[in-house]
Image (cartoon, coloured by chain):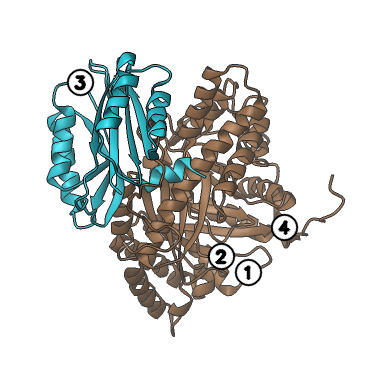
Chain colours: A brown, B cyan
Amino acid sequence: LSENKEFRPVAQDQNSPMLTHIEILSTLEMLKNEHLDVRTVTLGISLFDCAGDGPDKFADRMVSKIGIIARDLVKVCDEVAIRYGIPIVNKRIAVSPIAAACACGPHQMVEVARAMDRAAKAVGVDFIGGFSALVEKGFTKGDHALIEAIPEALATTEHVCSSINVASTRAGINMDAVYLMGKTIKKTAELTGERDGVGCAKLCVFANIPEDVPFMAGAYLGVGEPEAVINVGVSGPGVVKKALDRAREANPGLDLGQLSEVIKHTAFKVTKVGELIGRRVADALGAPFGVVDLSLAPTPTSGDSVGEIFESLGLASIGVPGSTAALALINDAVKKGGAFASSYVGGLSGAFIPVSEDLNIAESARRGFLSLEKLEAMTSVCSVGLDMVALAGDTSAETLAAIIADEMAIGVTNKKTTAARLIPVPGKKAGEKAFFGGLLGEATIIRTPGAENSGEFISLGGRIPAPIQSLTN
Amino acid sequence: VRKIIVSVLGLDRPGIIAAVSEVLFRNKYNLEDVSQTILQTEFAGVFIASRPDSPEIGELGHRLREKIAPMGLSFLLQEMETGEAWRFPESEPFVITAMGPDRPGLVSGITGLLARFDINISNLKAVFRGGDNPNENTMIYEVDIPVSVDKTSFREALYERGREMRLEVSLQHREIFEAIHRI
């Protein structure tokens, strides 16, 4: 591996201090029992030079460009993982928003998605993101075509992820796009109905989408980004939980200020791991290092859960009163620790609360501690939003759009990123279980109180103006 | 200038370093390096010192014996080798840990392998309290692996040795520990 100057490895000279026993054993403990890992290394690849005299040409150039730039991605990640003893769970690719890079008709858009799928398969990554459009202020022809193509594209590909930004603090909320996404989600669920609407798990609707998210389904390469870039997503909810448990066991008198300090320290360590691994991979691939996205991202595995952190802070379950305050504390401490550890923290950085992907959160929803309303409230203080929420199959496009609009309003007004990844599970009702498989997990379908009463509001369309930036109260 | 090296062993108690360094001082020796460690109840210290006129060391030995023998300590005094030291090849720092049920031959099993690959140990901490609890039987080696050593075959050999001895073994670049714990 080639090495850059900043991180040059040197044979230990006599002056470098010895590591302590505790430093080494605590690192092993994080790796072995607390699920410390690098959740994803995502290689961003610009597709703006792939434009040709038609979508076929674009697809060919795209496949060949991805094949060249990402050829060694998986191999290099595996080598770096072994060298440092830190698992890199997922290797992914994010490309320029397709609606901007290749404006064509909807049928051709589906073909482009299939070509992305082939390119991903060829280099062995698990997801490729960027089947995306940015429509917060209005649609181009390409944006319309891409959104129209989403249901079929996601139903007929395995690795392609799609994200649509429909709102921003500067532009307001494009309510026509919100309604359109309600319909698109509905149709995507129907086309993947035999698998509980899993296509929707690969589709995210955003407000204020960052340009450098390494996590799926929202990853795409922003137009302000370089030709190629490595962004890293680290995780570590298990590490945070265990650190809290240990601290409280050693000193039961710790208050919330002191516990947030514990989270901060832990986030610092986890971020340092991410930056080291990211830089090493970037060096080896000859691409610049972009950002560490420090997000507490759970997997459906016991001990790798964001929900369990709430219990370590003394709440019976995520979702009970006090959960929003606890989440605000967690999210802020994570950001503070991460920002000290690396000057290049970006993406979504914060705590994720994806319902089906977290055993503990899914269970809280099943037991009724966590409602849709409480989830929505919590998203005002954490990163992302209504994530992997299974809804009844008969939820209308209008109700889906209304839920999305609420979530977008939280992001736009609070100058933060929010997103909705909703899955109306075809043929199933509230209380039944939906199974998405693998890392996507499973979830009990959550009730939508007051559903089917928002149609008129949604059908008004137009753009909700950008919010005022003064009179802050 | 010829350097001398003194190693001191004995039951730990306050005043050992004070006694040795006082004798060196009174005999006009200049201390260059001192390191000490305590294993269980036993003290071990190593002192490197020099004197511009490089006298015979018999007199110093006599004075040391006078001072520290009554404290129940033994020592070894000799002149340092002046021959050329082992030249370290260009290496990279790694950390090896091995944990598992206690049994005879664990350190020799791992270090034999390191020697075979010309890997130098720069720091070692091994604790064996017996029994099957891996946390009570741990070895942590900081090593320098020459860049000429094929890391894949070394890694395989190390894991294989670990399996033979029922040890859980890890091999990680030192940087990861520094990244996590140091600002």
Marks 4 and 1 sit apart, C-alpha to C-alpha, by 18 Å
> Disc 2 marks which residue?
A133
| Amino acid type assigned to the residue bearing label 4 in the image | Thr
In this rendering, the answer to whether B11 lies above or below A310 is above
Marks 1 and 3 sit apart, C-alpha to C-alpha, by 69 Å
Of marks 2 and 3, the one in the foreground: 3
Residue A128 visible? The answer is no
- Residue B102: assigned label: 3
The lab-note entry on whether marks 4 and 1 share a chain reads yes
- Residue A139: assigned label: 1
Marks 3 and 4 sit apart, C-alpha to C-alpha, by 62 Å
Q: Which subunit holds the residue at mark 1?
A: A
Q: Nearer the viewer, residue A71 or A149?
A: A71
> Disc 4 marks which residue?
A169
Q: Which subunit holds the residue at mark 2?
A: A
Callout 3: helix, strand or loop? loop
